[in-house]
Image: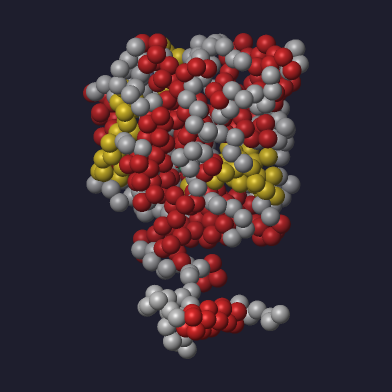
């Protein structure tokens, strides 16, 4: 739709201009630093940053009702920079001019209601928000679109040459980083560090395919992270891990989209999200906080983080009800099917602690919860979801297992409506389904396949057939015999009635 066709009171706001004043703000000592440099930890105290907009108050000058209209009308524009997460430009990274925004089709992923059977089985109304429909097939693209748009902007304003972007990854961050960097070919190169043997073949194929330098480290994600941090501290590189607060900014779009999808009415809504490095839950909390503060939403929805018992430091931390007595303690992870969340020392934990506190305070009650689920539940619920029209990855299965657990604990009641984050596409983690179906899970995963959830292909090779096409070129009679008997065998198997 053309600009002049929009209502005149909305028109001036449709194409956002660079605005706001973002600063790196240390979570520990509060010191602020300008964003003109790549900076990831406070030079004074080594803590991580948030990226607040010092002029956030200006956004309150526009009524919440007008903001809703701005976003709804903006959605009709066919301007690539505003088609993805930057539809919510003012609430993401408003200093970036539209011409520097990198848009590869991320964001605005579908929200699909569970069918009747699944809702009854689980015991409440729920949806999957399919973040596996992002370009590199995980939600990481939301953050990467923002981080790389910012890098692109700095390259242009500062005349930088050949930036090297680097990250450690449980698989999806590197896939996304490599994709976005490859789009900025000539300006940005990417290098990724992966824990050897702990990413799926599909996740490994992605950075390789996008031309990144790929390094395998004999260790787990937490070890890769330490190496990357050392590189970022000592060399000129751009760090693309979620330590980078620009990624958190981009991932806030997840909350904005949920708000818009439900017409900004989030009463009785619950969001469930798996926690690994805790960047995503931080972003989701802060996204809802921003919309709430400006009056775009009137309710802060309940947020539930989920962790596997094999990688549960955040769950353990919140087990202690008294905030003053809580002690942060990283854990040593065990093998997990929710491999992308298999993190024992989440980088964003300080962000989680401060964001959860603010969220609960503004909500006037405890509104953020963390539950723990077994590896068995993650696998079983993923398979059940996918047998009912979804395409959840193991972490999406973790979200659903988390819902079942939350219902059991009374954290969610049947009046509420739940949105589950399906963080990646099922095909990325298909090796776990395969191990389940073939009964090949190593014992340390603690998963035993349930017979009724297994599925394997049947070889159709009836013994009364003389020749098969893989043995020789069949004559007309032989071919007819092969087709008829094969068809009959399948029909018998399926118990088909003859016409
Ligand atoms: C990264 C990732 C997670 C964990 O998100 P965090 O922000 O690290 O907590 C969960 N699922 C998938 C598919 C991921 O790629
Ligand atoms: Zn500091």
Residue 125's x, y, as percent?
Answer: 70, 50
Residue 72's x, y, as percent?
Answer: 69, 26
Closest to the observer, 12 or 66: 12
Is residue 241 among what the camera can see?
Answer: no
Give the vertical position of 52 relative to 349 (above or below): above
Quick check: 264 left or right of 322? right
Asked where in the image residue 445 lies, by quadrant, the reply is bottom left
Identity of the residue drawn at 25% across and 29% down: 230
| Picture quarter with the C terminus | bottom right
Q: Total number of numbered labels?
A: 0
Asked where in the image residue 79 lies, by quadrant, the reply is top right
Give the vertical position of 111 relative to 117 (above or below): above
Asked where in the image residue 39 lies, by quadrant, the reply is top left
Give the vertical position of 166 relative to 27 (above or below): below
Is residue 396 among what the camera can see?
Answer: yes
Closest to the observer, 304 or 176: 176
Identity of the residue drawn at 56% across and 78% down: 487
Closest to the observer, 310 or 316: 310
Residue 450's x, y, as percent?
Answer: 51, 69
Identity of the residue drawn at 61% across and 46% down: 128
Give the vertical position of 387 relative to 31 (above or below): below
Residue 17's x, y, as percent?
Answer: 57, 11
Q: In the displayed orientation, state which residue is furthest to the front.
A: 476
Identity of the residue drawn at 38% across and 29% down: 181
Quick check: 343 left or right of 492? left
| Picture quarter with the N terminus | top right
Q: How is the image coloured?
A: secondary structure
């Amino acid at each position: 739709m053309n600009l002049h066709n929009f209502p005149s009171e909305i028109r001036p706001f449709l194409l956002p201009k660079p605005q706001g004043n973002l600063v790196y703000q240390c979570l520990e000592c509060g010191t602020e630093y300008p964003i003109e440099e790549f900076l990831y930890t406070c030079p004074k105290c080594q803590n991580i940053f948030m990226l607040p907009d010092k002029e956030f108050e200006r956004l309150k000058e526009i009524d919440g009702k007008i903001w809703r209209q701005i976003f709804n009308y903006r959605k009709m524009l066919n301007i690539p920079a505003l088609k993805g997460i930057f539809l919510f430009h003012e609430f993401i990274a408003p200093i970036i001019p539209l011409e520097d925004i990198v848009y590869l089709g991320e964001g605005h992923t579908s929200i699909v209601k569970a069918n009747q059977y699944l809702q009854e089985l689980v015991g409440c109304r729920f949806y999957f928000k399919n973040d596996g429909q992002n370009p590199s097939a995980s939600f990481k693209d939301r953050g990467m679109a923002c981080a790389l748009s910012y890098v692109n902007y700095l390259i242009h304003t500062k005349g930088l040459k050949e930036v090297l972007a680097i990250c450690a990854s449980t698989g999806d961050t590197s896939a996304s980083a490599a994709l976005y960097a490859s789009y900025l070919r000539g300006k940005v190169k990417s290098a990724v560090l992966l824990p050897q043997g702990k990413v799926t073949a599909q996740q490994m194929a992605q950075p390789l395919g996008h031309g990144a330098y790929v390094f395998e480290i004999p260790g787990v994600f937490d070890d890769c992270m330490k190496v990357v941090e050392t590189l970022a501290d000592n060399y000129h590189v751009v760090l693309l891990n979620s330590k980078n607060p620009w990624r958190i900014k981009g991932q806030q779009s997840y909350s904005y989209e949920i708000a818009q999808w439900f017409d900004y009415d989030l009463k009785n809504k619950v969001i469930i999200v798996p926690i690994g490095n805790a960047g995503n839950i931080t972003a989701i909390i802060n996204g809802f906080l921003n919309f709430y503060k400006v009056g775009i939403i009137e309710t802060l929805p309940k947020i539930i983080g989920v962790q596997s018992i094999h990688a549960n430091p955040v769950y353990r931390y919140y087990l202690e009800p008294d905030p003053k007595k809580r002690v942060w303690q990283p854990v040593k992870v065990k093998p997990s099917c929710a491999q992308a969340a298999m993190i024992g020392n989440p980088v964003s934990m300080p962000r989680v602690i401060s964001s959860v506190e603010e969220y609960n305070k503004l909500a006037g009650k405890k509104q953020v919860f963390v539950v723990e689920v077994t590896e068995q539940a993650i696998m079983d619920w993923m398979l059940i979801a996918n047998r009912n029209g979804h395409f959840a990855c193991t972490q999406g299965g973790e979200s659903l297992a988390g819902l079942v657990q939350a219902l059991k604990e009374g954290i969610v009641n049947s009046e509420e409506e739940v949105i589950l984050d399906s963080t990646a596409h099922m095909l990325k983690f298909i090796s776990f389904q395969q191990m389940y179906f073939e009964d090949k899970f190593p014992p340390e995963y603690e998963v035993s396949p349930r017979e009724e959830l297994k599925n394997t292909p049947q070889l159709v090779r009836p013994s009364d057939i003389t020749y098969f096409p893989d043995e020789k070129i069949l004559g007309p009679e032989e071919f007819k015999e092969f087709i008829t008997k094969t068809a009959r065998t399948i029909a018998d198997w399926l118990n088909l009635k003859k016409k």
